[in-house]
Image: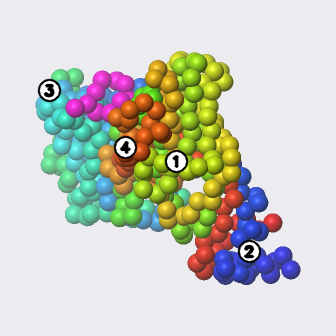
């Protein structure tokens, strides 16, 4: 009988009672761009290409059977008159015990590093690029290994690939001739970001650096979180991060997350709380955790929320911490396809806290992270006194930024369309 129920549910979600799908859905986390384990001020790790033998690379798996159309990388700084660089997609060799680029190019493009500071990041902290600077660059594929003109490279789901940046090594297009960087004319590239926590760093995907003639077997793997990315016609993959922002707030503002999950994912759901990264609040005050309805107005949902006494914190006003907060009251049933916002609203004039966000070059790059473009950073400022008591100031969503925040989902029901899932059948 159970097999029959599972079979019918796989054919149509409407054949299965909604109540039978919800009981096992508890503490399902979605939203954080990477695993939450922040450990301090983030730092850009750069590699200087100041010689013909130097290169930087990233090894990863393709997430889908799609065609790579553009490379995404984060630039460090230039000096003198930088030479042209080549960026390419290659296979991966594991024969020597270190997974590394195999030198077989499937697609490539030239990186025209400018002899100005227009690409340079703002110092070594991972805090964006600075005023008027775009340090995250998107370079379309232009040529294959033989120099023939192409605009994409087909990738296979689950297969290992590497993206490699080096100086142009020959006359085959897209390079027009051999060039050699030196200590005077050079550029650097951000291959990873440090201080996001040991657990968040992971071990795959990873970045590598090289100081030997290519193709080389002496690549060095980097321990920190890799910064790289690529685009297809359907979205962005990797970790194409522009920078980290810590948005401070007090009783005149609110910060949080805006979310609108597609109705193809599920029909209804509840949010029991959040887990987020930010600076710890000061003592002797409180912060409200609230849910807002669809229009971004200043009126939170009634009957649900949480007033967090800031004395109930392990440490106050010290560094970047991780917090898990749960709602009190009756959790509202939320509908997929509808926009909601969850905010942190300080109640005291001096109650300082912040919410960390990963910032991106374009709104569509949110698709590289769990929840995709369904999630954005939201805030409202300029309130007179406590912000959640205002009636005129509305929220503004930043669709090029993902908050370092997870929603805790439960009581999920399946989509009402055919092609449902038996995921929540008991």
Give how far apart the Cα atoms at labels 4 and 2 are.
41 Å
Tell me the chief SS of the magenta region: loop
Image-based side of 409 in relation to 206, left or right: right
Marks 4 and 3, how far apart in space? 49 Å
Q: Earlier in the sequence, mark 1 or mark 2?
A: 2
Residue at the disc numbered 2: 17
**4 or 3: tag closer to the N-terminus:** 3
Image mark for residue 393: 4
Labels 3, 1: front one:
1
Q: Residue at x 41, y 26 (%)?
A: 43
Instruction: Point out the tag, 1 or 4, that comes first from the N-terminus.
Output: 1
| Pointer 3 residue | 80
Name the residue that disc number 1 marks: 300
At horizontal 68% and vertical 55% (from top left) the residue drawn is 410
Please state the total of marks drawn on the protein image.
Answer: 4
Callout 4: 10 Å neighbours few (<14), some, many (20+)?
A: some
Determine the secondary structure under disc 4.
loop
Tell me if label 1 and label 4 are in contact, CB under 8 Å. Answer: no
124 inside magenta stretch = yes
**Region in magenta:** 122-131
Q: Quick one: label 4 or label 2, which is nearer the N terminus? A: 2
Q: Is residue 214 visible?
A: no
- Taking the image as shown, residue 57 lies to the left or right of residue 30, namely left
The quarter of the rendered structure image containing the C terminus is bottom right
């Amino acid at each position: 009988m159970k097999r029959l129920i599972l079979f019918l549910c796989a054919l149509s979600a409407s054949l299965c009672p909604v109540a039978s799908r919800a009981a096992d859905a508890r503490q399902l986390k979605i939203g954080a761009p990477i695993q939450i384990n922040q450990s301090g001020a983030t730092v850009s790790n750069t590699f200087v290409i100041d010689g013909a033998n130097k290169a930087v690379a990233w090894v990863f798996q393709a997430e889908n059977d799609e065609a790579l159309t553009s490379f995404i990388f984060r630039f460090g700084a230039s000096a003198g008159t930088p030479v042209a660089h080549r960026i390419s997609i290659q296979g991966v060799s594991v024969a020597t015990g270190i997974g590394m680029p195999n030198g077989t190019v499937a697609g490539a493009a030239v990186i025209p590093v400018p002899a100005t500071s227009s690409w340079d990041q703002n110092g070594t902290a991972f805090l964006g690029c600075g005023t008027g600077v775009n340090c995250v660059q998107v370079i379309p594929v232009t040529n294959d290994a033989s120099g023939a003109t192409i605009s994409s490279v087909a990738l296979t789901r689950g297969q290992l690939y590497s993206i490699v940046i080096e100086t142009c090594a020959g006359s085959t297009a897209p390079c027009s001739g051999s060039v050699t960087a030196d200590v005077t004319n050079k550029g650097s590239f951000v291959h990873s970001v440090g201080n996001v926590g040991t657990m968040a760093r992971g071990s795959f995907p990873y970045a590598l650096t090289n100081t030997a003639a290519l193709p080389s077997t002496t690549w060095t793997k980097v321990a920190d979180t890799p910064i790289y990315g690529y685009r297809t016609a359907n979205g962005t993959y990797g970790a194409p991060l522009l920078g980290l922002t810590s948005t401070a707030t007090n009783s005149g503002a609110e910060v949080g997350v805006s979310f609108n999950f597609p109705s193809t994912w599920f029909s209804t759901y509840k949010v029991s709380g959040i887990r987020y990264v930010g600076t710890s609040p000061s003592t002797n005050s409180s912060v409200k955790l609230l849910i807002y309805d669809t229009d971004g107005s200043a009126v939170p949902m009634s009957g649900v929320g949480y007033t967090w006494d800031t004395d109930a914190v392990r440490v106050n006003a010290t560094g970047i911490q991780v917090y898990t907060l749960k709602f009190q009251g009756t959790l509202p049933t939320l509908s997929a396809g509808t926009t909601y916002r969850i905010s942190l609203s300080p109640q005291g004039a001096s109650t300082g806290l912040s919410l960390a966000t990963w910032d991106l070059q374009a709104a569509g790059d949110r698709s590289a992270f769990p929840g995709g473009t369904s999630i954005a950073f939201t805030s409202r400022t300029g309130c007179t006194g406590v912000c959640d008591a205002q009636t005129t100031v509305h929220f503004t969503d930043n669709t090029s930024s993902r908050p370092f925040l997870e929603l805790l989902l439960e009581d999920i029901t399946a989509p009402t369309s055919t092609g449902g899932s038996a995921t929540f059948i008991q």
